[in-house]
Amino acid sequence: MKIISIIRGTEYDLSLFSEEKISKLENNLVERHTKKGLDLYFACLVRKKEIKATPEEIVRQLYLMVLTEDMGYPVSRMELEYEVTFGREKKRADIVVFDKQQVTSPYIIVELKKPKLKDGKEQLKSYCNATGAPIGVWSNGRSISYYHRKDPNYFEDLSGIPMSNQKLSDILSERWKIADLIKKDKLVNERKSLKDLILEMEDEILTSAGVDVFEEVFKLIFTKLFDEMESGRKPDRNLEFRNYGYTEDELYNIIQGLFDKAKDKWEGVFNDKEQILLAPSHLSICISSLQDVKLFNSNLEVVDEAFEYLMSKSQKGEKGQYFTPRYVIDMCVKMLNPKADEKIIDTAAGSCGFPVHSIFHVWQKILESKGLKRSHLFTLEEKPAECSDYVQNNVFAIDFDEKAVRVARTLNLIAGDGQTNVMHLNTLDYERWEQDFVNKPGWLETYSKGWFKLKKLRSDKNSYRDFGFDIVMANPPFAGDEKQTRILAKYELAKNVCLEKIKNVPKGYSIINGEPTYPEALSNLNNSAETVYQMSDGTFRKTKLKQATTMSRDVLFVERNLDFLKPGGRMAIVLPQGRFNNSSDKFLREYITDRCRILAVVGLHGNVFKPHTGTKTSVLFVQKWDDELCPKVDDYNIFFATMQEPSKDNSGDKIYRNTVDEEGNNIPLLDSHGHLIVKHDLFNHDGLTGDGIAEAFAEFAKKEKLSFFADAPLMK
């Protein structure tokens, strides 16, 4: 019998352990008849007697194999169910390894009874504090965490535990290079996310540290990204974002110095005088939590997930604007297929997911054209000049949230190797860009390079309304209305067109049968046309214009984004599903079809934006009419698709793909970098999953001879 069947359905797992150890334990299983029926037992390595094979006991025996076979600890130094006294109360620690010299003093305590990290860590801390043990380990067989007890109040993360012939100081002082970080990356080896680690830091010290959590964690991630980049380009360099056994004050000075270097490299995110405000003791805990994490990967999703959490905590969600999941962004990028000579902008950038993933898409095409492969550290390595030129000259982003802009600038600065065109502006209120932003003290100092490039892309040098971008991708705010009359007056979609009944047709007026579309009514009013419409009941109506007093921001963003596009340009925009269905939004649909060809509508699952919102959304893809790139026709095919896989559960937690091993067991499907793959049907993930919506659209686009896929052969 397979022990996986005993584990299945519980909070325990076996993915941390090798097939060899699992098979070895299975070979020791024996059946025993008890009063309750047939049970499975195996001989305990330490207690030397048969023990019932429960989920907790299975994980314990497998970890005992790790301690004895891999780490070299003798069974003679171990005790199971070790009694720990708390006043009158007594509890039992799962595994205790005793000190080599002081043979009765606990050295390592392992907690397995509590299969959830938060519960297990609290239990582990209490055991270590009560016994004085300096090292604690928690695991449920899927994830594992190692801790160093510095004093009763603070536990620092360890990269692992010492071998039996090592001292704790050997682990703490071991110098790491980028290759070590790749090999021992905590996110891969301990099955954790950066968000999980931030939550742990909050529980441990951040909530009581008296600092802005967003700002201080942002500084640390910013600094660590710089450290990884420096070592990635100089593989023999020792990583500096690491505690090699320094005092707390020594470590603080080292990290502050590294932060200063990062600020010099990537300007315009922090001011020159910015300092790390965490106390040295708190900083030491945070460094130990983050130092074993590799932030750079084949993309920047690891960092982005952490920023999404931090931003949602601070303010982003309150404005109805949510970070777009990276798998949705990748689908949009694959479907719009940006080229190296095309200019792209995100007008509601958030953390800059659309531009950054467009960068990755174009970079990969550039590398393929040179016969180069995308590597494990794709985002870290120096690229051909064409790659950095593309970022610095063709990629732009705007957001009204200053914190989001700083996050976006960080990611783009890394991609652009020190340059970026991400700016703090109010996309909708373009007439006051200079007054409210550009002329403010310090704004040009930070954003001047991108600003002057953006100005050159204007269609009219005296206005900031129309631009000449090839691609716009955006996820504008779902919630909230624009109520400022001054702003609403600039938008055609903020005008209500009414049909006023008249008795007689004035002399000289032309009569048109049928009700006008929204664009026709707008056109007639704008041209002061002398036109009357005759309804099906024979009555006559005259168009009348009325300024709306309020309008949803996502509706205004549709018009604004189309103004950013040149003729033949294309757009992907995330909109609430109601915009495609509601009779009250007919005017919006007519406005879009008048200015664009609708390329595709992709319905997203209702869980995609959870836990922030359960709003059902779709992505609209359009191309502006143009005589050459997209000639206007009355009838054409449109690609429709609906996402079938939810990608997240009802709580907003991601659902990951599984695969089957040689033994027929379900195990997590990992990409080439050891990371979990989200379960969705939007596109083929590096050949590891089936084709999805993006691939189906690509084939549709080639058959339709759409301009941006015209140079590609049919897939089948």
Image: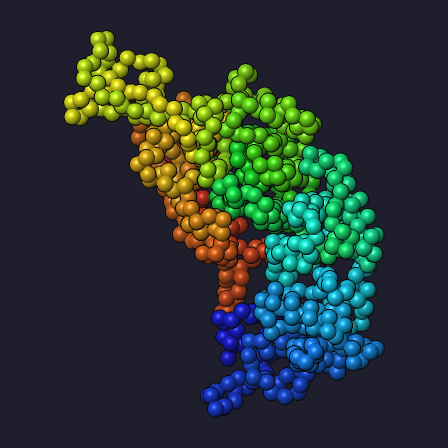
Q: Quadrant of residue 672?
A: bottom right
Residue 51 location, x and y as percent? 59, 85
For the residue pair 554 and 635, the one nearer the viewer reads as 554
Give the position of the C terminus as an image quadrant: top left
Q: Considering only vertical position in the picture, is 37 above or below 571?
A: below
Can residue 404 be seen by looking at this rendering?
Answer: yes
The residue positioned 66% from the left and 87% from the top of the image is: 48
Judge by depth and name the residue closer to the eye, 713 or 101: 101
Tell me which residue sits at (24%, 17%) in the image. Answer: 532
Taking 414 as reference, is 434 above or below it?
above
The residue closer to the viewer here, 72 or 167, is 167
Mark count: 0
Residue 446 located left or right of residue 480: right
Using residue 511 as the reference point, say whether residue 356 is left or right of it.
right
- Asked whether the viewer can see residue 377, the reply is no
State the image quarter where residue 97 is shown: bottom right
Residue 303 drawn at (x, y percent): 62, 48
Q: Residue furthest left?
A: 538
x%, y% of residue 490?
45, 23
Kindly give the residue lying farthest to the top in the view shown: 508
Left or right: residue 84 versus residue 7 is right
Quarter of image, res 390 = top right
Residue under the point 55% across and 37% down: 349
Front-most of 275 and 559?
275
Using residue 322 as the reference point, say whether residue 528 is left or right of it.
left
